[in-house]
Amino acid sequence: MKAIYKAFCAGLACCGMAVTLTSCEKSFDNFIDVEPQGVISEDLAMSQPDEMVTAAYAKLGDDWYTYPFNLWPYADVSSDDAMKGGSGTTDTNYHPVEVWSTLTASTPDHMDELWYHFYCSISRCNRALVSLEQYGDSKLGAEVKKIREGEVRFLRAHFYFKLIQMWYQVPWVDEEVYKNHTEEQTPNNEFTHEELMGKVIEDLEFAYNVLPEEGPGQTGRAHKVAAAAYLAKCYLTMAWGDGYEAQTGVSHINQEYMKKVLDYTAVVERSGYGYMEDFGDIFLPEYKNQQESIFAVQHSDYQDDNTLYGRANWSNMLNGCWGMWSCGWDFHKPTQNLVNAFKTKDGLPMFDDYNKETVYPVNGVPTAQKWDPRLFHTVGMPTFPYKYEAQYTMTKDNSRTPNTYGYYTSLKEVPQRSKGETYDNPWQAFAMNDYVLRYTDVMLMRAEAMIETGDLNGAMRIINDIRQRAKNSVGKHIGYAADQCEIKLYPNSYFQNRETARRCLQWERRLEMAMESDRYFSLRRWGIASKTLNEFFEKEKDVVYEGQTYAQYYKDAHYSTGKNEYFPLPYIQLYYVPGLYTQNKGYN
């Protein structure tokens, strides 16, 4: 506190005010030491461990479009699934993410906000753990204290996994660092990438060992099955290598980690979670927290929770369709490459030929080209009902800048138009949960590990179960596209060798998880990001929809191995304590 008011006094002196340092200290000493009003004291807060745990949970959905915790710009826009969208390439600062070639430590500056808010979230977790250590036994009892500690360590692992996904090596700030006030002495290279992942796993294993199965009234809380699913995700990420292509891919697979994936996904498979009958229901708010949802960030409408604005999902606030919503800003736009990937021939994917010709379905005009039904649940297209509602049929006018970003729109993160926004002036937001882990995602992890450990028949069973669900997902919501859909299960011949089976799995993950903040991280995990993205840039820059050329900015795009696999540490973070953090390679 002395430093604060001495600096303030120095500032007054510079302004020519004739005040001595001594008199300044006397003048301000009492003022500075007054207990602040209208806020809770730290001592009182720390003495309420259950409330501190709630505060840690509250950070799950405490994000914004410039720092979305679901990472849609860094996982989708950075991939071949999505373009940024908006009014043009300068609308928000995410454009470098979609072309990679102009990505620097200061551009986009949104990265600094994301880093900062992730560490704010971790700070709440650390404070909750200290509060539980000091007051948990007396206020909650030993059993509940242990469960709450497991929940908080699950949350901390979640935030750290996101940080490591983005930045490879980050400072590990835990409750001991918090208690010792050594945050500004903690470098980001104290631990290797694998050691950091080991610390995330340690938190999740603790959670797995102490948390109960999810029970009544526990919606939104961490539980044993969620911890198992997250452990599987961590081990699968590590099983392929460290993410840099020189050390990643089929030649670097760690079989022991793959076996861990099988162990933990088996826990999920035996649980009460399962597939929704219709693919479209997964992305309607009235079905949130159903059997597909293992762990999700909870959002609500003001009518549900009796608050002014509800607990809206602000991370996706820009992603509504232009002219369809009162504040639809038309971001997060599907690519033509993604649409083409849904093509089928004789009901099966067109692995080699899917992107040779640009085509798109037109409502009521079926052609010989057929499509996987999941296209019509994932991508909004002109002539088709928007999110299944004919009274809100899309037209080409529902694109904000078609000459830059084309005519498609994303469907999964929005409710049906008739349900309206949670908040709509001057922004918009929806009461849509954000999936962290859903059942099909985890089963695809299991199938991936099965392929890499030699159980090709087991992988085929899972993948065909998912395709069967897609096949069944026509009549309820997209009957208008029934004559444009054709999908069949993979025959045994597709799973006679690991290479073909792997291709099926990777294709299925793309179609199933499209526009769900997964794609880039999967490409990186498999070690194929550079090949996939550079081929995508070359083709997509010439895409045409009904005579309209768009996406020409991809002519300047390029993905560089040994650099772009991870994002650069934000410049501002490097600046705060010079020399403390080491920048990721390639960005110096």
Image (cartoon, grey):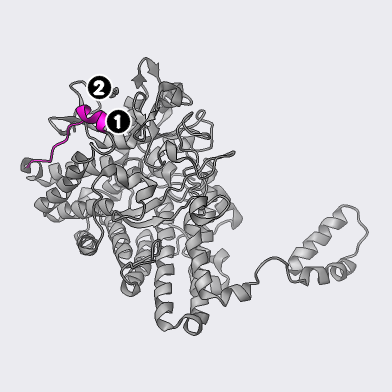
- Do tag 2 and tag 1 residues touch (Cβ < 8 Å)? no
User: In front here: 134 or 464?
Assistant: 464
Question: Does the rendering let one see residue 549?
Answer: yes
User: In front here: 554 or 218?
Assistant: 218
Q: Position of residue 518 (x, y in %)?
A: 34, 46
x 67%, y 66%: residue: 39
x 46%, y 38%: residue: 319
Q: Pointer 2: what residue?
A: 357
As drawn, 98 above or below 140 = above
- Report which quarter residue 7 is drawn in: bottom right
Q: Position of residue 108 (x, y in %)?
A: 52, 41
Q: Position of residue 100 (x, y in %)?
A: 42, 37
The quadrant of the image that shows the N terminus is bottom right
Q: CA distance from mark 2 to mark 1?
A: 11 Å
As drawn, 333 above or below 163 = above
Magenta-highlighted residues? 479-491
Q: Is residue 555 found left or right of 124 in the rendered image? A: left
Asked if residue 490 lies in the magenta stretch, the reply is yes
As drawn, 416 above or below 235 = above
As drawn, the label of residue 339 is 1
- Element at badge 2? loop
First of labels 2, 1 by sequence position: 1
**Amino acid type of the residue tagged 2 in the rendering:** Glu
Q: Nearer the viewer, mark 2 or mark 1?
A: 1
**Amino acid type of the residue tagged 1 in the rendering:** Val
Q: Residues within 10 Å of mark 2 (few under 14, many from 20)?
A: few
Q: Position of residue 436 (x, y in %)?
A: 37, 54
Q: Is residue 118 found left or right of 511 in the rendered image? A: right
User: In front here: 34 or 26?
Assistant: 34
